[in-house]
Amino acid sequence: MYILIVEDEPKVADFLKRGLAEEGWQVDAAADGETALSMIQAGSYDVIALDIMLPGRDGLSVLRTLRNQGHNEPVLLLTARDAVPDRVMGLKSGADDYLVKPFAFEELLARLDALVRRRTGSYQDILKAGDLELDTIQHSVRRADQHINLTTLEFRLLEYLMRNKGRVLSRIDIEESIWGMNDEPDSNVVDVYINHLRKKIDKPFNKPLIHTIRGFGYKVEQSDEY
């Protein structure tokens, strides 16, 4: 997932960048409104975390400009202003959610995940494929009632596959969604992580759920036999 953090306090911005990167997000950052506008107009983000108090053009001005230009990326406003009129002003300017500083990182992450799910229409908290179950809230995976330990990137890859179960996903689709990469023919990172997942998800069990479609990519196939 791609996120742009617009925050002028270096320590806060660095904390958010490191925390989100550890959770598998692809993170860009801007320290002022003009830079943020240029980055959004030039790129594509799944969600934007936007501080209101910025040098020069403030966050609300950035938000209004984006909405007037037709940008519909989900925007989470970050601000120390917690009065009701301030929240109302932010939402009326086009924000999708509002988080008051100081905040817990876990709450920020949950709100960002919710905004991305809302945009993609993927509201399910528990995803299933055959006897495989992934809980997006508890960040847990079970198959045949056995708990499976996954790294953060393995979890995000499996979640992406399961949200698109039955659909063939190309390596480029997976790279852009999980790692934020462009097409790199010499890179085998997708194949490596698919193999990691297979060792944990498929090999200990009788029936594989992760399938290779030669020349196209990968998919998680839901079976009617369960």
Image (cartoon, rainbow, N blue to C red):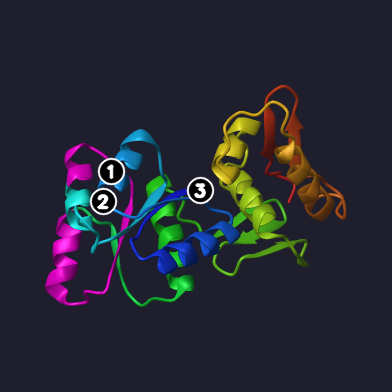
- Do the numbered discs 3 and 2 sit on residues whose CB atoms are within 8 Å? no
Q: Which residue position is annotated with label 3?
A: 1
Report the side of 125 relative to 167 (left or right): left
Name the residue type under label 3: Met
Q: Which span of residues is magenta-colored?
A: 65-93
Q: Earlier in the sequence, mark 3 or mark 2?
A: 3
On whether residue 91 falls in the magenta region, the answer is yes
Q: Which callout, 3 or 1, points at the residue further toward the start of the chain?
A: 3
Name the residue type under label 2.
Gly
Dot 1 crowding, Cα within 10 Å, few <14, some 14–19, many 20+: some
Residue 209 appears in the figure: no
Q: Residue furthest top?
A: 215
Residue type at tag 1: Leu
Q: Which residue is identified by label 1?
A: 37
Q: CA distance from mark 3 to mark 2?
A: 22 Å
Query: Mark 2: which secondary structure?
Result: helix
Magenta stretch holds residue 71: yes
Between 102 and 224, the one nearer to me in the picture: 102
Label number found at residue 33: 2
Residue depth check, mark 3 versus mark 2: number of the one nearer the observer: 2
Between the residue at mark 1 and the residue at mark 2, the CA separation in whole angstroms equals 6 Å
Depth-wise, is mark 3 or mark 1 nearer the camera? 1
Residue depicted at x 64% and y 48%: 157
Where does the image place residue 215, in percent across and percent down from the top left?
A: 72, 22
